[in-house]
Amino acid sequence: MSGDRRFASRALRAQGRFLVSICDAELLGTTLRGDGVEIRIDQARYGGGLIDERYALQLVRSGDIIDLVGRRIVQLALDNGLGHPDGVKLVGDVPFLFIYRL
């Protein structure tokens, strides 16, 4: 597993839940459009800092509500049994995955 800084992330606790948003770093600052959906990959939601794969997995494993955008982060989650391929949606050609733990 690579140690380079490949993902942009923001994590916070709110109302007793741990919220995690992670995107492939190169998507930060872009707007994804497709099938009547528009997602802004902005600093406020995803720009808390750059992280490597190991820390990204740690965040995804510990989150209650997880928002993942981009080919690398979604594939990393799936490869590690976090989320299900049927839950992956595309906005344009970019995959996203929401994981909710009750």
Image (cartoon, grey):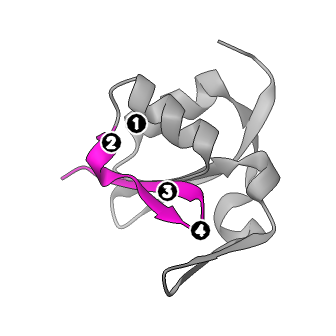
User: Does residue 77 appear in this view?
Assistant: yes
Relative placement, left or right, of 53 versus 90 is right
Dot 2 surroundings within 10 Å: few (below 14), some, or many (20 or more)?
A: some
- Please tell me which of labels 1 and 4 falls first in the chain: 1
Disc 1 residue type? Ser
Residue indicated by mark 1: 62
Q: Marks 1/2: CA distance?
A: 20 Å
Q: Nearer the viewer, residue 102 or 28?
A: 28
Identify the secondary structure beneath mark 3. strand
Kind of residue sitting beneath label 3:
Phe
Residue 86, percent from left and from top: 27, 48
Image location of residue 80, percent across then percent down: 40, 23
Q: Is residue 84 above or below residue 1?
A: below
Left or right of 46 in this view: 63: left
- Residue drawn at (75%, 17%), measured in percent from left and top? 3
- In front: label 4 or label 2: 4
Q: Report which residue position mark 3 lands on.
A: 96
Q: Spatial distance from mark 3 to mark 1, Cα to Cα?
A: 19 Å
SS for callout 4 = loop
Q: Is residue 68 above or below residue 35?
A: above
Disc 4: CA contacts within 10 A as few (<14), some (14-19) or many (>=20): few
Residue at the extreme bottom of the image, as rendered: 36
Alpha carbon distance from label 4 to label 2? 17 Å
Q: Which residue is mark 4?
A: 92
Residue, far top: 1
Residue 92 included in the magenta stretch of the image: yes
Instruction: Give the camera-side residue of 42 and 84.
Output: 84
**Region rendered in magenta:** 83-102
Distance in Å between CA atoms under marks 3 and 4: 10 Å
